[in-house]
Image: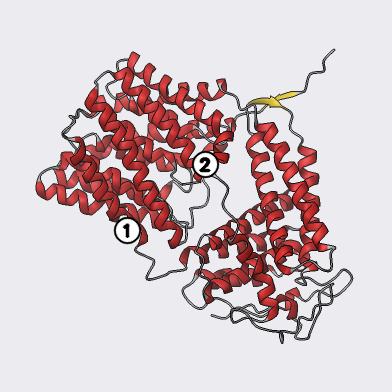
Amino acid sequence: MSSATPTRVRRLPVLGALRLGRPSELWFKPALSVVAAVAPPSLLLVVLGRLDLAAYTMAGSLCALYAHNRPYAARAKVLAWVVLGMLGGLAVALLAASLTRNAVVLVTVGALLAAVQKVMCDATRVGPPAHVILTFVSSAALFVPQTLGQVPGHLALAAAAGAWAWLVGMAPAPLRPHGPERRATAQALDAAAAYAETARGGEEGAGARSAAYAAVHAAWQTLLAAGDRPSTARRALERLVVRAEVALAAAADADPARLRAWARAVRGTGRIPRTGDPRRDDGGPRRTDSGARLDGDGPRQDGGPLGERDELVGVAAERAVAPRPLWSRLGPLAPVAVRSALGCALAGYVSLALGADRPYWALVTAASLYQANITLTWSRAVQRVVGNLVGVLLFAAVTPVAQLGPLALVLCILACNFGAEALIGRNYWLGSVCVTPLALLVTELPGYQPTGELVTDRVVDTLVGALVGFVAAVAVTDRRAGRRVERALTAVDHARERAARLAADPAATPAALEAARRALAAAVVDLRATADAAAGEWWQRALPQERVVLAEQAAHRTLAATVRRQGLLPGPGTTSTYTHTEGASP
């Protein structure tokens, strides 16, 4: 006799999916960047009287939307890969369009491209806007009449615009070379302060703690991606992230006001706060549990006292670790790939069956839905439908202005680009209100078309893409979600055991202890992300929620013990000196 594992069905939100959030801290950067990237090529084509080619230059210009949260050393590489990925997808689409006009074949090619783009962006964590822009570019190109002789010229236009977008994305580097790292550090400090304010237990405190650990982990990843040559500014930022970690380990003793003051100073353009060594904040010499003297009079390395050097040895150790191979990140994404390919193909086929001239609108709508789980996919479907329906009304309102001439059309496109990036951080549906008229205006670059026909087709394709895409997501269940949670639990247990063993070993080196602490913190962040993603699946076996909570609690206790073993916190029963840290300098 077999026993059935209990299953559950999650309620899918509607109004909650439309709730507006706070604007993104970086909203103005992609908004201004995309305008700066789109405007020069488009205006040049207006002067030359070849605005019909603007769709190809815009494909390259839209690459300026990517990598704004990355340090400039990493941003240069990511933007280059985005441009190459865009050109690869565009090349396949243009070749397919030049070889066949069979709409079913073109939809199939578009669906396969969408699946590949989704998986590669998820595996490499490129985003936002991730695969949606790439899919929009390649899918639209599939249904533009081409000849083989035109393909090289159109790709050259996209490549030139992509190179310009790369320059636009890198332009702030000379003015504020550590801007991304400073923002990530400030976010970690603010998150640690928020947790310190709510560290009284309960659900709110647990949520703030998870958010704080995620922000600290993101800050470390940003600093690690900044390159292998440490600078004075980067060392100062690393010490501030250490302060955030200390606050997480001893939230009751942390000073939220001091953390927020540091965050404000880091966000500015002045000097980065110099926090000193947290193990000497009382002004006198102290020792770690192993007896190491921490009076700052020891040998120096990289211009810092012994205490500062010990704090940061884990950074160098982590930089020496090879990144996880790409192929190992592709396996868990198989259900997402199948969902994307199936949903996009079916959406395109249904759109064709209804007589649509632009089935790629339904295809792109379906591609934009797929998130980490069914609950998030449903929310995105609601947001997409609402945003597109409001967006077609906006398109109808701006069309008389756009049809005044080529220059007016370009200016309307620029305004929609700016509005989409400025608003999408508050909620996806709000950004879609501007994305929809943008997509419709792009179709008018080769020549003006009847507004009523465009609006009707867009509404129908939106509803088809959202409905068919979501049905495909429900049909292709992620059976491995529970197993990924189990693996994440095992990883946390192993990392916790190693950190606890090193914390209890008087002979453990600072580098080993710091690396173990960082590995445990990363494992906890991954566990929370994996558990949240699995919890949002539509129909599945019950997840071990209690084990996840207990594992997180045990890991946080071990992290606190590890930080105390490093001398960053006083021992149990002693007076904390954390709140008496050195103030932030301007």
Residue mark closest to the camera, 1 vs 2? 2
Where residue 146 appears, as percent x and y from the top left, is: 19, 29
Q: Horizontal placement of 225 versus 41: left or right?
A: right
Where residue 23 appears, as percent x and y from the top left, is: 48, 53
- Residue situated in front as seen by the camera: 438 or 360: 360
Q: Residues within 10 Å of mark 1 (few under 14, many from 20)?
A: many
Where residue 100 appears, as percent x and y from the top left, is: 24, 21
239 to 188, vertically: above or below: below
Q: Can residue 394 be seen in the rendering of this structure? A: no
Look at 58% across and 48% down and name the residue there.
324
Q: Horizontal placement of 65 versus 233: left or right?
A: left
Disc 1 to disc 2, C-alpha distance: 25 Å
Q: Horizontal placement of 274 versus 281: left or right?
A: left
Q: Residues within 10 Å of mark 2 (few under 14, many from 20)?
A: some
Contact, mark 1 vs mark 2 (Cβ under 8 Å) = no
Q: Secondary structure at mark 1?
A: helix
Look at 32% across and 20% down and name the residue there.
105
Q: Can residue 193 be seen in the rendering of this structure? A: yes
Q: Earlier in the sequence, mark 1 or mark 2?
A: 2
Where residue 485 appears, as percent x and y from the top left, is: 70, 37
468 to 26, vertically: above or below: above
Label ID, residue 123? 2
Label ID, residue 168? 1
Look at 73% across and 23% down and name the residue there.
7
Mark 2 residue type: Ala
Q: How is the image coloured?
A: secondary structure
